[in-house]
Image (tube, grey):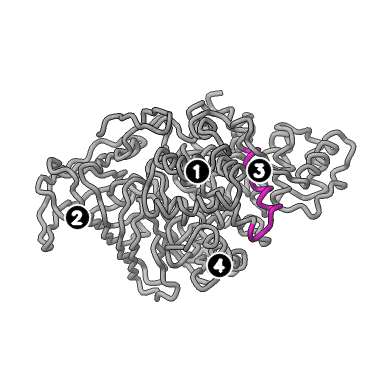
Amino acid sequence: MSPLRTLALGALLLPVAAYANDPYSYAEPDEVRVTHLDLKLKLDFPQRKLDGRATLTLDWKDPKANALALDTRDLNIASIESVDANGKSSPLQYALAPRDKQLGSKLTIQAPQHPHEVRIVYSTSPSATGLQWLPPAQTADKKQPFMFSQSESIHARSWVPLQDSPAIRFTYNAEVIAPKDTRVAMSAPNDPSHALSGDFSFKQTHPIPSYLLAIAAGDLAVKQTGPRSAVYAESSVVGKAAHEFEDTEKMIQTAEKLYGPYRWGRYDLLVLPPSFPYGGMENPNMTFATPTVLVGDKSLVSLVAHELAHSWSGNLVTAASWRDIWLNEGVTTYVQGRITEALYGTRQADEEALLDIHTLQREVGELPANAQRLAPEPGKIDADDTLSDVAYNKGSWFLRTLEQRFGRDTFDNYLKGYFNHFAFQSITIEQMLDYLKPNLIDKYPGKMSWDEVKEWVYGPGIPKNAPIPDSPRFDAIDKERAAFLADTLDADKLDAKDWNTQEWMYFLDGLPDAPPLAKMQQLDAAWHLTGTPNAEIGMRWYVHAIAAGNKAAWPAAAEHMTRIGRLYLTMPVYRALSKTPDGLAFAEQVYDKAKSGYHPLTQQAVEALFAKASKH
């Protein structure tokens, strides 16, 4: 481990970790780095495991190093051997440390001869945190089982032994053996016309960090959406998904005009079963997406804009550690807004930005001061918890502030230069700031002081002069909501017939935490919100209906919670129910039925909530 060092940044002296050593990884890349992964996998659906062979190409940095440290979690290691430049193999001694709850088990391989490659034969656990195995009944078409990975943040180590840190990038080849009627997809260029032969090969020629290593397999159909894009989904879903995502090529072209060429070749989308715990995952060449965005009117396709934007901010220029994650998520949320504005107009982009701003304003004060910072003190937050509204919404708000101060053309040119300068590198916040100061702040004096930059990045909370977009539609909704709550406007007189998804979200977000039961009943009678197929609206509605004591909405809330495994759309409803003894008992009954269809990360979150609620 490297010691703490002091890094000079303009007039600021900051103690920061030497990020060659990530606090969320056992890897010691100052000694040796993995540069390439040759992966062979066999899918075993009945046993819910992968049988794997990972061959790691090594770049030894320290002549005195005598061991290779890797990250693992719940892997069964069968053998480890060295492979020299001529392909000759020899067994190596190794030790697997006891399991740490967050980090997993350190795998230490004795390698004093500095082999060119190390080969590990292993299998995964059925409870691997980075994999979910679904029986046919839990898929859309109910024909075949399904498996998919979710490696971010530190879950790649649960299905491949590697240096599981975003600071370490590697290329990879993979060969996957699967049942003959199963299609396999990975975070590498995929061939939409590949025969279902049971043998799939992939080659990722761009160096990527481990959290972008991804795999999925199941009964997948493919439909082209453009010259370099296609949708992969189950047969009953693929047509609807292709329609919803038909603007993908326009999105790619829009981003290219702003920030330079798309450097990854194909951009495909895989629509996963509803148990996927996140909205989307920006796996290179193959974004994994939740089906909850398929609402028929493209009102939620900003999720695709977000994951596509990661092809520049995150996949191309990557945060070096989870402490630096706003460089991925905040920059991406800003770029997403620019793509959305170009394709769907300023109104939708501003409404989405305002929803993000209001979410952050509600929640930031409840966080510890360290978690309110774009640059938190390293190692003091769990890796998964760094993916917070602060990283996404405060980060994008900071960039919108820079755009406003320096002008759009100037800031676009700066950001394009930033992506080119750091392409295919993993960088720290301090490296980003070292680039920002001469190339924007000092280059155009008088626009923003360096103290203001430091307040945004290192200060808790939100700077008082943060700019907020105008939205006449939201202003009108504020007035209607106030009149409705004051009994001067009936629910059926709300001018809501033409509200889009974002406007309904805003209306519901602005209701009191525990609105009067009669008002919720009136609203439901007029607009039939109970049972809505739109999960964004549904989540907000059920939270308020439950808080108001409207037990008539509970069965539909249970259907919502059972149908959707996405954490963001499910956990608020569980939290609302868990605030009363009757509600907690009902939530536990729902969970007993829904649990088997949830991802391990969702299971962990719900069970932690129940444990906390039971103590009160």
Say whether residue 200 is magenta. Answer: no
Using the rendered image of the protein, determine whether residue 132 is visible from the camera's viewpoint: no
Foreground: disc 3 or disc 2: 3
Say whether residue 355 is magenta. Answer: yes
The residue at which mark 1 appears reads as 443
Which comes before the other along the chain, label 2 or label 1? 2
The residue at which mark 2 appears reads as 119
Q: Residues within 10 Å of mark 1 (few under 14, many from 20)?
A: few
Q: Amino acid at mark 3?
A: Leu
Which comes before the other along the chain, label 3 or label 2? 2
The residue at which mark 3 appears reads as 355
Q: Residue at x 60, y 33 (%)?
A: 363
Which comes before the other along the chain, label 1 or label 3? 3
Task: State the CA–CA distance, disc 3 to disc 2.
Answer: 48 Å
- Residue 118 in the image: x percent, y percent? 18, 53
Q: Amino acid at mark 1?
A: Lys
Any mark on residue 249, and which?
A: 4
Judged from the image, the secondary structure of the residue bearing numbered disc 3 is helix
Name the side, left or right, on which 326 lies relative to 211. Answer: right
Q: Quadrant of residue 56?
A: bottom left
